[in-house]
Structures are given as C-alpha cells and as structure tokens.
Image (cartoon, rainbow, N blue to C red):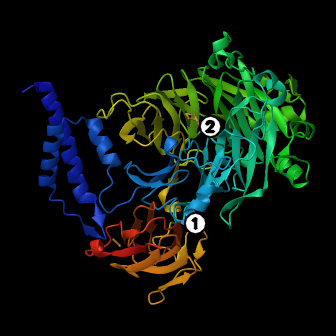
Amino acid sequence: MKNSQSTRSRYLSIAGIVMVALVALAWSCKTGGGEVQLGSVDVAGDSNAVIQERGLTPDDVYAAVKTFVPSGRYDDYVMFASGGHSGQILVIGVPSMRLLKVIGVFTPEPWQGWGYSDETRAVLDGAKVEGRDITWADTHHPALSETGGDYDGEFVFINDKAHARIAVVDLRDFETKQLVKNPIALSDHGGTFVTPNTEWVIEGGQYAAPLGWKYASLDKYAEEYRGMVTMWKFDRSAGRVVPGESFAIELPPYWQDLCDAGKAVSDGWLLCNSFNTEMATGGIEDDKPPFEAGASQRDMDYLHIIDWRKAAELAAAGATTTVNDFPVLTLETAIAEGVLYFLPEPKSPHGIDVTPGGEYMVVSGKLDPHVTIFGWDKIQAAIAAENFSGKDDYGVPIIDFDAALETQIELGLGPLHTQFDDKGYAYTSLFLDTAVARWTLGGAYAGGHDEADWTLVEKIPVHYNVGHIVAAEGDTVSPDGGYLVALNKWSVDRFLTVGPLHPQNFQLIDISGKGPSMKLLYDMAIGIGEPHYVQMIKADKLKAWEVYPEAGWNPIQQALDPHAVAIGEEKVERRGKTVEIWMTGVRSHFTPEKVEVKKGDHVIWHITNVERAKDATHGFALPAYNINLSLEPGESTTFEFDVEESGVYTYYCSEFCSALHLEMVGYLLASPS
Ligand code: CUK
Ligand code: CUA
C-alpha cells in the first residue's frame, strides 16, 4: 500500500462529505411530487468506495457533481464552437461538455449528407474560390443572431479566415443554408460579428492586399494594398445574407484584426483593431526584419471606430465605387463623411470587446500586460470636439488617446480576449501567463461585485496557452455568468497521448462565486481542428425542430419540395437518355427497390423520407458515385449523376433505422448501352 495514513484519512473525510451530501439529497430531492428513494446509505457507500478507489479530491468530487448531467436530463447551455481547420461548427452542451453535433459548413460532411445532394452541393458552390472547390476552411468566429443585443437562437454565422468566406446556419434544423465568398478580399478575420439586431453580419479583413485580388508588388504596399471591412446585409425572413445589398469599406493597409459591434449606448458603431500600422512587408530572406518584428515596432496601433449606420446610408445612396462588381465605400469618402476614426491602442492589439451596456471598449495588446479600457462617452466627446492628436498617413483623424482613456489594468502577460458576467466582472485570457484573469468593471458596473472597481481579482491557471474564452452569453447585453470555457491551444499533458498532434483543450471553469473563487471543472479534448471562438447560449432559447414540419420538406428552401412524393406516388420516368426517379423511404424499404438504367444515361434521383417519428432518419448510400445522403424525418432531396459504366450497384440505407435495416436496400442495374 502506497497510501499514507494522512492521504487515507483525507479520502475518508471526502467520503464523509459525499455521504452527507447524498443523504441530504435523498431527503431533499423531489420529482413529480414524490420522494426520491436513493437507498441513500448503500448509494453513498458505493460512492465512497469509488472516490477512494479513484483517489478523488474534494475539488474533483465538486467538479464531478457540478458537471454531471444524468441520463435523460439536458444541459443548461449550448456552445457553438468554431471547428477550426475542419471548416465546421461544433455544438457542445454545458456543463456536461458533451459533443452534440458537428455541423457541416465549409467542408463536406458525409453523415449529414452535406455536399452529396444537388441542393447542398449548390450551397458549397457558393464557397468556391475562383471556381475552385476548397475542401477545408479556417473557421474562427461563430456569431449567434441577436435581437436587441441578446442571442435569439435563430441563426449562427461563421467566417473562414483563409478565404474570406462567411456561412449562414439556420438553427431550426442546425444546417448550413448559405456560403458566400467575399469578392474583394482573400483573407478575413474580424468576423463574423453581428449588429445588435442582426441587420448586418460583419466581416473584417486581415492581411492587406490589393482589393479585388489584383497584383501589385510589395514596393507599392502603401499605395496599392488595402484593408477592408465588409457589411453583409442579412434578411432574417429569407435566412440569407443579400450580397446585392451589402458593401465594403476601404481601409488603410493595416492588418485589421478582431472587431466588435457597439451595442446599447454605442449601437450604430463598429470597432475593429489593427496591427502592422508599420506597414511592414517582411523580407527575412533579404535581411529585412521579419514580420514578427517589423509589424511590432510601434507602441500603438489603431483601433478603427466606424459609424456603420452612416456608412450604410452612404452605400444606399450610391456613394460607393465598385471592385469586382461589389460596392466599396472609399477611404476618401469614409474620412470626408466622418465614418472612420482611429484611436491609438497598445501594443500588438488583438481583442476588442464591448461591455454589455456598450459603455466601454476593452482592448488587449498581446505585448502589453494591461487591458486598456476606453469610455464610449469620452470617444464620442473627443470626436465631437475634434480632439485629435493628428492624422495617419491616409488622412484618418486620430482621437487623442488620453481623452478617450478610461483606465488601464495590469493583468499579466499576453492578454487576448475579454468576456463579461452578470456580477460586473470581466474575464481576460492571458496567453503567455496561460491563465484567465477575473477583474472588476467600474463606472456603470459598480456595485455588482464586492471589490474595488477596475482591479484584478484573481487569475486561474489553464492548460495551456489560452486563446479565446467564452462566458455564458458573455458578449451580449445581458451575460448570465455561471460558466466560462477557456479555449486552450495546447493540451500537452492533459490527455492520453494520441500521437504528436495533441487535441486542443476546452476547460470548463465555474465562475458562479464572487471574489477569488474560480474553479476548474472539466477538460474536453477537441480532436478535429483548432477552434478559435465560441459562443454559449441558454439552451431554452433554441427552438430546433425535432422532425421537419411536413413530409417532403426541402431543408435548403425551408419549404415543401416540388419533387417530394407520398407513398404510392413513386415512379421512374425515362426521357431520352435521362432517367428520373421519385422514390420514398420508410422503415424498412425504399420504393422502388429496382432501378434500371443504361450506360451513358443521366440520372436525376429524388428521395422523400416520409417518416414523422423523431430520429427516424434513413441514409441513402450509392457506392462508386460518391453519394451518401441523410434523409431526416420528412426530408426530401435530389442528386444527379451520369452512368459511366455498366454494372450492378446496391443502394442501401446507411443509418441503422430498424430491425430490418439491412434489408432496406435496392439494386441499380446499369446495362451496357
Ligand atoms: S483569434 Cu484565435 S485566439 Cu481568430 Cu479571435 Cu484570438
Ligand atoms: Cu432506413 Cu436503415
């Protein structure tokens, strides 16, 4: 026995705590008005044995009890996480940290049939780059749709940094409805973010380049290269962004980074930070400073402060030029019309986060141990009084730093991103310290917390190298508090080794207490890509369908499909060399079970799943033609292909739907022509 006497007595005392807790539970829990009979002494006894056997500490037991969601019960919150390189969105329950779904977005996803039907391929075609299929993405920032600055649970958007593309996902069925390629930029980063009523989906740029993907040598960087932010008009009733009503704003060739929309008192404005205002062009191979040094020389870069409402009015009035047929408000117009202002921000800025009431802008510089907090009233007063410290090389007025500054708080090394809770605390990730800092807001938020305003309260270590953090509804006008998740880039020693590519680590942290009381609860391995941002919504705001509203539903149109058929209406028609099939699926057969075609035919195949039962999904797999569909209850879909060889193919249901699922099959007979 290696257990020392003191360790053993520690286990016993934990066991005692748990036993007391369980006995208390047995007496206090009620379901449907009846006493829950736990057989408390035996259950507690078993638990004690498990606690001892597994060597759990009191903190472990607290974490386990706090995060356990019993079978049949649901999570309180749902996270929508960027799937990173996978190009998808991860849906995760909190506090259980169970993965509920991977939504196919920029990348084909076979289980959901995403990219294998005509309709879904057409959506993916929207993500082509210069006509090329791109089968990956670098998704960074999911944004839930908002009403009045609060998540409304209707849509989620996300960007692809690598190709400047955005996606629209409808949360009625958790499926992607639209992918759009930005016509003027190749990369983006400050997106997606939404305005408080989701009138606009914001996509800020990243690495400056000539707008419209034209060529210019790096010698012409200052003259020819440009940054941008694009405002995508969102039509909520159609569930689509409307490229024809969208526009971009030309910006200097600084590298715009994160953005955030103003809200409440700062509604109507947009804030994007930037780096590389040095306009470094690299050149390590020519003995010039590498980007990492060249783009970090200045102590200050510029927070871009943009009056998007005024910009939208100008765009609607036609005060734009076009690049690749896309309206662009020029830098000159933006300056002349008072759309664009700069505010110096220290140093190597990354995160910009607006407080819940919109009163303060929190900026984190990766190379500055402080967060810098600007007051919106001060920014507005400085603009009104033209309290500028000068202009940048392009003529953009620079607001006087001291005039806009509310305060600075020293938190630690490598501050990145900030979130908020319901008690007047803010939380900032510290990449280099590999910690999350809790600090107090002041001013409009005084009184929510017990500590002095604008002070560091506590730092909790995370494992390791945290990027973004998310608190429950922590970037809305009414954050919930309770839970925070740290999105750690490295996991190092937190999980079993699965080869040199380690999973990323989402760490759930209890932030329900006041003062220095944060507790680490759970580590969730993410083995699919590097997530950047996550948003966490109260689960009861989501109103997803359990089955499609009617049999024959087309999920892309969110309407009945004209090619849907009911049982008894199935048919196969030949028109010259085209064969068209209208098929149904129901447990446990497809109708028809035999389809005869000839080599050289073109096949158009419609399938309707007529099921109305929850979870009665049928798959439809057609080998050799790269077809795998997910026919969810009520769904109707279409795919086409050319019969390239003669042969015998079996099509079958690829979802274990019933006892006779193996018999849910048919023959495609392709005869030589
Ligand atoms: S970024 Cu990845 S840690 Cu794209 Cu929002 Cu900061
Ligand atoms: Cu339908 Cu298996």
Task: Return the x and y of residue 87 as percentages of the image width and height.
Answer: 53, 47
Residue ID at (78%, 24%): 401
Q: Nearer the viewer, residue 220 or 658?
A: 220
Image x and y of residue 557, in percent: 61, 70
The N terminus: image quadrant:
top left
Q: Quadrant of residue 50?
A: top left
Question: Does any portion of residue 284 appear in the rendered image?
Answer: yes
In the image shown, does 319 or 196 lie closer to the viewer?
A: 319
Residue 438 circle label: none
Residue lying furthest bottom: 568
Residue 140 versus residue 435: which sits nearer the camera?
140
State left or right for residue 495 relative to residue 540.
left
Is 617 situated above or below 526? below
User: Looking at the picture, how far across and down is residue 504, in whole percent?
Assistant: 42, 36
Q: Secondary structure at mark 2?
A: loop
Disc 1 crowd rating (10 Å Cα; few below 14, some 14-19, many 20+) is: some
What is the three-letter code of the residue carrying label 1?
Glu
Q: Which mark is residue 446?
A: 2
In which image quadrant can residue 400 be found? top right
Q: Nearer the viewer, residue 138 or 619?
A: 619
Q: Position of residue 313 (x, y in %)?
A: 87, 52
The label nearer to you, 1 versus 2, is 1
Ligand 2 is in which quadrant of the figure?
bottom left
